[in-house]
Amino acid sequence: MTSPVLTTVAERWRTRVGSGGRCLAWSPQCRLLVVGADGRALVDQPGQLTPPLAPDPVAATWMGERQLLVVDTVLGAVFAGSGAVGEQAIPGARCAGHAQSLTVVAGVEVMAVFGRRPDRMTADLVPTGVGCGHALAHVGGHDWVVGGTTGVALVDVMRGRVEASVEAEGVRTLAWAGAAERLVFADLGGSLHVLDRFDLDARVELQALPEPVRHLALAADGDLLVVAAEGSFAWWWLDGSGLPLDEPDWAADHGAAVTALAMSSDRLVASGDAAGTVRLWSPRLTDHPVAELSLDTEIVDAAWSRCGRHLAVAAMSGEVAVVEVTPGQLV
Amino acid sequence: MVGSTVWITVCQSPSCRTSGIDLDEAAVPTTTTRPTMADEETVPVVVIGGSGAQRLVDEVVTPDDCVLADDWYGPGSVRIGSDVAHRCSGCPCCAVRLDVVDGLLRAVRQARRPARALLVAGPGDDIATIGYSVLSDHDLARHVHLGAVVMVIDAVATTTRLASDAPLGPPGELDALAMADLIVLTRTGEVTEAARRRLDAELRGVSALGLVVSLDGESNGRNPTLPIRRALIRPDAWRGVPAVERSGPTGLACAATDGPQTVILRETTPLDPDAVDAWLDRLVDTNPLALLRVQAAIAVESTPARVLCHGVRSFAVSQGQTTGSGADRHESRVVIVGRGLDVDELIRDFAATRTR
């Protein structure tokens, strides 16, 4: 049995991209993509840098192992890889994801679905009805959830229709737990909503936080929710129906505002803050980090590889670090 | 002394909640042992609205600025070298908040920050919501501050409205004019002198804070954009002492018919810190959506420097005055722009904060 409490962190490499870090993405086989504020993309390791792909990148995803997609507010979707570069305009494009051979980009009132046609760079547009999409998650099969300006919608991207939707004011972050089929989203008012995929109306609203929640992470089992609000963050333990088992545990003061949050498949939580500090936390020890590293400025993104062994973090200055994390053995 | 008291108004839309949460503790700056970019001077945000906002941006933008534009330029036609963000649709209030926060964060979270962020408000965008978003978002507060609000007015269209006995503008535009630090008139060369005088008088009836200038230049042949450039470079218009005359009456300075009012309060004796703190709390608490702009320089007993305070709606922040106190340091000056204000009550309650 392993325990993440006695955890070791070994830095694999550190480099700098462009005029600032923007976003990170891991492929299923642990290939890393880092997109800088100037639109350059670093692939796999330092030195492997593309020319600028996009003027205002906001998100990125791998389309399998050989092609990547950068979401840009000006150009829409920009493709690179497999010897080709292309783009497709998607008004208001903000976020993207890839699953089961389909790549989805959320824009204004629509999802652009790539992969349904032989030409992978041509999208079918599916209406979402949630304003501008700011957050996206694949929830199994051909179903995706998108959170936007006016709420959350469950969309079957193959049939091209909204299966269910919930109104909410300003959804900018959401998380999905596959094993529990549970969705959590945060609205601008600071409320957290826990929903069952098959009954979006039967939602549990967790206590309103004083701040709009920017960052949340949900364990695959759906029983652990981590929420960042300003200088600290809360651990919520949820029962089978999504109700909190107890009051949330508030982690120790981070020292600066939390600006990035990610949970690994081992349930290790990485949090980055405005001072450039990255902390790793275990759900078994919620009041003290199990490891720590530093970058030179505010952390803008953190991402775990799917295996949970590698963590990439990017800073506002463009500094990027990749560390290998080994959860400790329980003795 | 007056503290950094923060209130949160969630949204303007009827379905949203308004919560009066006092976040005194959260407003205290976090101390860190290592320097961060956030420790450096924050980037001033200049909010530019009105019919010729984009034209004005084209006139005043410099390579060091970033622009958050309203228009969709499309691939290959992005005209500004630095960061550009675009507006998106949805609930107007929430869309503005999401766009403003996300766009500004992208624009300033870079190794080399822009000197200014020029934020173009689209037609129908609520300037108060934009100002509130810039001020109240904690992530943004580490990087930017609200520098100035600029409104651009088409003199021909507006004087035509006035000649037809229509109001100066729709309600949202009147609110924005009342909040503005700078009012820029375009096409002034195409209106008669009488129409121009009437326009000036109408603007004075709405705005007590706004400096009125013409983008088309005046008759003396100066570079027309120079005064505008100079006037725009006031990154601390909101964080400084209110830009109203040092001496003058206390009370209603101007009021548009069925529109915003501007109230100026003055006091030359030091104020009781607890009393003025409680008054400001009460003011914001009881008028969360009616307050378009609050700006104050407050001389309190026992504090050598005045306390400067500014806010929009239910959010206000304060800091000590570091420069320029001089002979004014015992004078308190408060400007309140809002709708449905009880002027007599404001005068009475403010006077009651004097040291006894």
Image: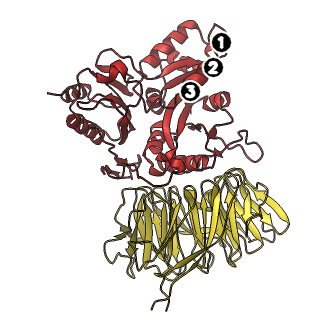
Chain colours: A yellow, B red
Callout count = 3
- Give the letter of the chain under mark 2: B
The dot on residue B222 is 1
Left or right: residue B162 compared with residue B243: right
Look at label 2 and name its amino acid: Leu
Give the secondary structure at mark 1.
loop
Cβ–Cβ below 8 Å for labels 3 and 2? no
Left or right: residue A82 compared with residue A6: right
* x 54%, y 17%: residue: B159
- The answer to which quarter of the image holds residue A293 is bottom right
- The answer to which quarter of the image holds residue A134 is bottom right
Cβ–Cβ below 8 Å for labels 3 and 1? no
- Pointer 2 residue: B226
Look at label 3 and name its amino acid: Leu
Left or right: residue A291 compared with residue B112: left
Q: CA distance from mark 3 to mark 2?
A: 10 Å
* x 46%, y 70%: residue: A184
- Give the letter of the chain under mark 1: B
Look at label 1 and name its amino acid: Arg
Q: CA distance from mark 3 to mark 1?
A: 17 Å
Among all residues in the image, which is located at the extreme front?
Answer: B33
Left or right: residue A146 compared with residue B32: right
Q: Position of residue A35 (x, y in %)?
A: 68, 60
Q: Earlier in the sequence, mark 3 or mark 1?
A: 1
Dot 3 crowding, Cα within 10 Å, few <14, some 14–19, many 20+: some
Q: Position of residue A121 (x, y in %)?
A: 78, 64
The dot on residue B232 is 3
